[in-house]
Image (cartoon, rainbow, N blue to C red):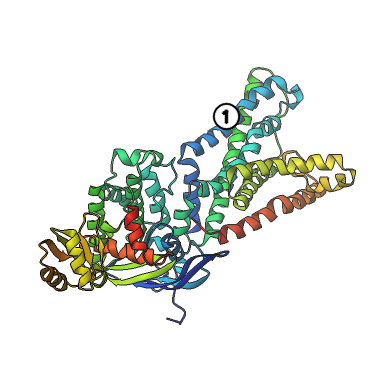
Amino acid sequence: MIEVKGLTKRYRDVTAVADVTFTCAPGTVTGFLGPNGAGKSTTMRMICGLTPPTAGSATVKGVPYRRIANPGRHVGVLLDAAAQHSGRTGRETLALTARVLGVDAARVDRMLELVGLADKAARRRVGGYSLGMRQRLGIAQALIGDPSVLILDEPANGLDPEGIYWMRTLLRDFAARGGTVLLSSHLLREVEAVADRFVVIAGGRIVAEGAKEDLLSRHGGTRVRGEDPAALGAALTAAGLAFRTAEDGAFLVDAAAGDVGRAAARAGVALLELRRADGGGLEELFLSLTAGTGAAASAPAVEEAAR
Amino acid sequence: MTAATAPLTEPARPSLARLTLVELRKTTDTRSGRWLLIVIALTAAAMTPVVLFAAPEHERTLAGFFSASLTGAAFLLPVLGILSVTGEWSQRTALTTFALVPERHRVAAAKLAAGTALAALCVAAALAVAAAGRGLAEATGRSDAAWTMRPSVVATTLLFAMISVYSGMAFGMLFMNAPLAIVLYFALPTAWTTLTETVDALRDAAGWLDTNRTLNALLEEGITLEEWARVGTSLAVWLLIPLIAGLVRLTRREVK
């Protein structure tokens, strides 16, 4: 259980995080989404008592993090995989954590095994690790105290597809056993597959929050592709349906599939594709929500042009 | 949830002894850390032939070998102290350290305790090297000076070694940057010494505030009461104030 209430962080005249409130329930994975610099890491550091908030509060399992006697036994934290001593071996890094937490030294090898860093890799110094290996070490470090809450900042960064799949399974299992997971990302695809809930943050403020299904159906719309794109576009406009052009020439329409199909039928346009815009739904949501907090309301189009 | 929440007290927080052992392990489990300790040991051994061949014969006492073997340590123990603190920031391990132990002053206390142990180890090693040196001098017929030494010298030398590590840690916590802390640690007292030697009005104050002078009394036999007072005064300025300011900074600083 993680409860964040009105968390705010100001640096001189810059507000990094403004009045952020959300709750992560046991048994769920919460995806904390936002572009770089949105305030995700600052929020997570405030939850873990590493950054003093300007206002607001956060509790983990009902207690402010800094009042947990042995926090590593309740909360697994990975805030930056690169923040490891480059001169220590992977095994030694974990052994030190095990000592601080007072867990059985045998857990060190079990965790190394679990994250796929056993044997040779464990004896190498962290300075020679790839980013993906550091992420695996960081996850081992977060899990070594057998916590019931996980707070992970960009854990998928640097992982290969196999590693991302592995972590997805690991986090789903963790939540299925009643654990609470908060993980941040700007890589939307793998969060979409693992999270039950989303908290989307941009410019330090929460711009969307809710269950995955709700957010996707609310923002997904319909994807349609016609034999004659120009005629289809005209038909949609005539029917008063707002749409955007996807990168492959299809249209993303803010309407139900039935309305889109009828509009095309009236104009006699042959359709090649008509379905709910699922795969890219979150990406669309993410772009529209985060860009909306920028200067122009038409920013999604700009974002698309920029790609 | 406006009522005060009960803290999660189980499992218990790590004891100070446990944290101290962890900090000790952290000074020896990296190549750079091990090398620093090896260099301290090597300088101790390297000073033995210097005394054996270059020092006047009447100084080839056990005490003579002892103080010579600590020449390197006097310079390197503060560096050890500085690096044990600044390493957390330069290697960014502070993120893990303080996430696992949110009571940051306890980490600082563990570092000071670990520094005490290392200082004691250094002095013990220096004693062993000194005994070997004196024995060598005997065997080679290069000394018939004293084999004995007042135990109080060992005690004050240990104090000197501890002060060296603590001062380094204090500067490390205050500046949180190894190059800056090391340069200032050595430059500030030297600048102060130079200043007091050129400005007449400060000459009296120097006898009380210049650690280059006051602390030397700790390495010699028969320290007087006034010398103790000078040690205390100079340490208030060069150890206590940086240590308190450093602890305040450490507990408040945002960890990134």
Instruction: Tell which subunit mark 1 falls on.
Output: B
Viewer-proximal residue, A140 or A20?
A20
Query: Which residue is situated farthest in the top direction here?
Result: B140
**Between B200 and A203, which is closer to the camera in this rendering?**
A203
Identity, as a three-letter code, of the amino acid under mark 1: Leu
Examine the image and state in which quarter residue A119 appears.
top left
Residue A236 spot, x, y in % from top left: 20, 68
Return the x and y of residue A8 as percentages of the image width and height. Answer: 48, 70
Q: Which residue is mark 1?
A: B42
Residue A63 position, x and y percent, is 42, 72
> Can residue A150 be seen by looking at this rendering?
no
Image point 76% across, 41% down: which residue? B191
Kindly tell me whether residue A257 is visible in this rendering.
yes
Which quadrant would residue A264 be assigned to in this image? bottom left
Residue positioned 89% across, 43% down in the render: B200
On the picture, is B204 further left or further right than A53? right
- What element does badge 1 sit on? helix
